[in-house]
Image: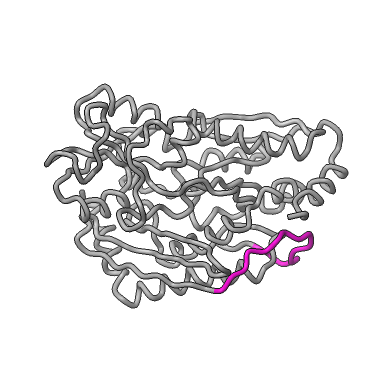
Amino acid sequence: MSGNGDAAATAEENSPKMRVIRVGTRKSQLARIQTDSVVATLKALYPSLQFEIIAMSTTGDKILDTALSKIGEKSLFTKELEHALEKNEVDLVVHSLKDLPTVLPPGFTIGAICKRENPHDAVVFHPKFVGKTLETLPEKSVVGTSSLRRAAQLQRKFSHLEFRSIRGNLNTRLRKLDEQQEFSAIILATAGLQRMGWHNRVGQILHPEECMYAVGQGALGVEVRAKDQDILDLVGVLHDPETLLRCIAERAFLRHLEGGCSVPVAVHTAMKDGQLYLTGGVWSLDGSDSIQDTMQATIHVPAQHEDGPEDDPQLVGITARNIPRGPQLAAQNLGISLANLLLSKGAKNILDVARQLNDTH
């Protein structure tokens, strides 16, 4: 992808010497590791720029005694960071893409989606159950997860287990697992465990037939001010075309379903031989009712190019002017088409009931 280097070189030439780019992040260790990796890439591309990392706590970091799905706030892990962007206190923010709502507040856009790591979920076992799988855990074993999506799918597959909410950052959740006797295992994103260097704690990776993943899981998104063309140009070279197209399809699917963290919605995408495959599903809270289907579209992963459209280029909150528009639209249409298919099969009723039950419990 020669466009990457050319775009970086052009931006480098136009940049004032030793300009400071301020990067916002959450305070957790994982958030810092993710932000450091993005900043390291940018530093290599733009050696004459300085980068300052500014860490802050978000609502989701502060409310730790309530399940995420109960808080009823779409931007739990992003709002404070977006306030800093709005007030020009930071120039860009690094997020886990799955934390970013499919509709961003006016004035913001996702200016880059970095190459995705393993998007699947992983099981981490209590030390006394190392070597087990979910299938072989004893009857009535308690498994911790903060996600309705995971609990709904896994209850359906592993009816001998109990699923309970567990909150806190990765360090906190692992400590609760290891030091208390409440949980036999917990479910976490494989990508987060790998970024933390905790590969040895992954006891089982869940395949799509066991548990499909969250929209955008495993990818990092860089949020910027939508009209800040300088910064959009700066971060745009970070776009990974395949990850971008998969995540556009996933986010379009979720947006059209009007899903969020208060209902169980999951996806699986794959790019093969010019085809983008999107599998999506919705579940009742207890997993007893579900609708899933798969669709595909012909989409060739493009090389980056320099000149994008001049009109508002956002698709599901994402701006990628250096990626051809056609494949982006095809990916978005795939997501919308699959959502419409599931809605025609009764997905809206399942989601409405799940929302009502979640609100009343």
Magenta segment includes 301 = yes
Q: Residue at x 36, y 70 (%)?
A: 293
Q: Percent position (x, y) of residue 353?
A: 24, 62
Q: Residue at x 84, y 41 (%)?
A: 15
Q: Residue at x 41, y 63 (%)?
A: 258
Q: Please state if 190 lies on the left or on the right of 221 as rendered.
A: left
Q: Residue at x 21, y 56 (%)?
A: 156
Q: Is residue 178 above or below residue 17?
A: above
Q: Please state if 85 lies on the left or on the right of 117 as rendered.
A: right
Q: Residue furthest bottom?
A: 344
Q: Which residues are magenta?
A: 298-313
Q: Percent position (x, y) of residue 352?
A: 28, 64
Is the magenta region chiefly helix, strand or loop? loop
Q: Is residue 291 above or below residue 143?
A: below
Q: How is the image coloured?
A: one colour
Quarter the N terminus occupies: bottom right
* Observer-nearest of 247 and 133: 133
Q: Percent position (x, y) of residue 102?
A: 50, 57
